[in-house]
Image (cartoon, coloured by chain):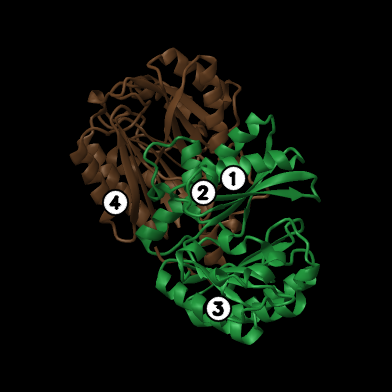
Chain colours: A green, B brown
Amino acid sequence: MIEAVPNVSEGRDGAVVEDLAEALRSTSGVFLLNYSSDVDHNRSVFTYVADDSGPLFEATMRLFEIAVREIDLRRHQGAHPRVGAVDVTPFVPLRGSSMEECVALAKRVGQAVGERFAIPVYLYEEAATEDYRRPLPAIRSGGFEGFPEKILDPRWTPDFGPKLVHPRAGVSVIGARIPLIAFNVQLATDRMDVATKIARSVRTISGGLQFVRALPIMLAHRGIVQVSMNLLDYRLTPIHVAFERVQEEAARHGVDVLSSEIVGLVPEDALFDTAAASLRIENFQTNSVLEKRIARVVGRPLPE
Amino acid sequence: MIEAVPNVSEGRDGAVVEDLAEALRSTSGVFLLNYSSDVDHNRSVFTYVADDSGPLFEATMRLFEIAVREIDLRRHQGAHPRVGAVDVTPFVPLRGSSMEECVALAKRVGQAVGERFAIPVYLYEEAATEDYRRPLPAIRSGGFEGFPEKILDPRWTPDFGPKLVHPRAGVSVIGARIPLIAFNVQLATDRMDVATKIARSVRTISGGLQFVRALPIMLAHRGIVQVSMNLLDYRLTPIHVAFERVQEEAARHGVDVLSSEIVGLVPEDALFDTAAASLRIENFQTNSVLEKRIARVVGRPLPE
């Protein structure tokens, strides 16, 4: 099974989001697992799976078709950085599929998007063609508004599509990666300087935790700020470690943590590990979870 | 599917424990999910399931046969209270079965144990014949050593079997209940008075949390004490609430919590809830768990 998790630059117009969801849902062989929108980010995340590449290719092309038609980045405002209408599309190998399949799928989608929609495409993470193009933030720096200049730099020639930013849909980042957890922590303050300092002290690039990206984001509708994180390898840097680091840094500024949120879906073992850590369970194993044990020993899951 | 979780008064003789496990494992239609022994408690817990009552009846009778042959309570010493060789046997309805089936199974096993092994049997929890016999601690008070006198009290006439304590196997408590979590917290001290005070402040019967039983236990092999809990309804009093109460009370005595352990198996939603609470996730739903969502939407689980 392979998972696709495109992030689309529309989180306010419910009709467009529903059109996008319906295009995915109606593709034969594709299962739409989840989609969610954030008004402040002005961004939606779709999660869908299929047993093979074929249906995922088809569904993702349909998603692009609607996004290119309905979204105009020149009029898009949101708290989250973005370079494209379909900003970033990772393919993720779940059990039973390989990273190689996902890389091949990313390249196939990338080539088709470049040709069919005249959108410049950058391959990232495991699909990247050069090491400096692996990290999403490197590709995305400068944003949609900066890309007309960036694309002229020979280092930033697109992997597919024209060497010309699409006027309304920008550019698109497509790739393959292991599962990540999109984890945001809300703070009981509207001070962006505090969120910025916390994000810097938590993220890998400025000397914080390994495998963590973090950005400060203003949630204008709620009147608070957020530290928006990507946990790139939750087995090595678990969710609760990132949460506790944010909590500690917030305390240093006299700010309380209000709540957190997971965008999209979260692998169960990440939650089991968090529970085991917070309860300090000795020698915890997922084998101790009733439903996991039943599925393994009996060979079929408990009914819902 | 129905689950059986007998607690047997033998946690030191590995050969006997293996014999018991093998008897369960080799019963057709029965799946032995887990078993674990504690040397200090001198007690083992077996968890097995079957689709119907028949195989569970058969497996449980085999367990009794071996326990009655191999265990002599007159020579049994352990930190955990007990009244029988097979001390207590709950049957638990999992999804797809009812409490009524479990009550009927408990009565069927109880009658057979009384007749075949001449062991006095008390029905407890949902299978109890009188309200005052519902709670396990009420039946178990006085212990194996006190039962020859207790059994003469007309209020404690057994539900099945002779009105005479079995010389080696004692009496047996059999019943039906919703899933509970056996959750123990280890303290960084050998002071039983501290464990006793904490257990009293946490448990329902002395004014603590709802749906919690708690006992202080000396773990002689480790040189520390333990607060041993049964969480009788983890949806109403979650694991992390019990853990935090123990932590707070321990802090009051200047004692650190070392670790915790779950005896037997734990339902996954109990761990999801604990993770969500410790991360303060807004509006958490199990629908946000990747594997749960795949099983629901795709209609089949991810392969292991």
In percent of width and height, residue B142 lies at 40, 20
Badge 1 is on which residue? B276
Distance of label 3 from label 2 (alpha carbons): 33 Å
Number of the front mark, 1 or 4: 1
Distance of label 1 from label 4 (alpha carbons): 36 Å
* Three-letter amino acid code at the position of disc 4: Leu
Does the residue at mark 1 contact the one at mark 4 (Cβ under 8 Å)? no
B251 or A53: which is nearer to us? A53
- Can I make out residue A109 in this image? yes
Distance of label 1 from label 2 (alpha carbons): 8 Å
Same chain letter for marks 1 and 4: yes
Distance of label 3 from label 4 (alpha carbons): 56 Å
* Three-letter amino acid code at the position of disc 1: Ala
Residue A271's disc number:
2
Asked which secondary structure carries label 3, the reply is helix
Distance of label 2 from label 4 (alpha carbons): 32 Å
Which residue reaches farthest bottom?
A116
Same chain letter for marks 3 and 4: no
Q: Which chain does tag 1 point to?
A: B
Residue A110's disc number:
3
Q: Which chain does tag 3 point to?
A: A
Q: In this rendering, would B5 be left or right of B94?
A: left
* Three-letter amino acid code at the position of disc 2: Leu
Badge 4 is on which residue? B24
Mark 3 vs mark 2: which is more N-terminal? 3
Q: Quadrant of residue A5?
A: bottom right
* Three-letter amino acid code at the position of disc 3: Gly
Does the residue at mark 1 contact the one at mark 2 (Cβ under 8 Å)? yes
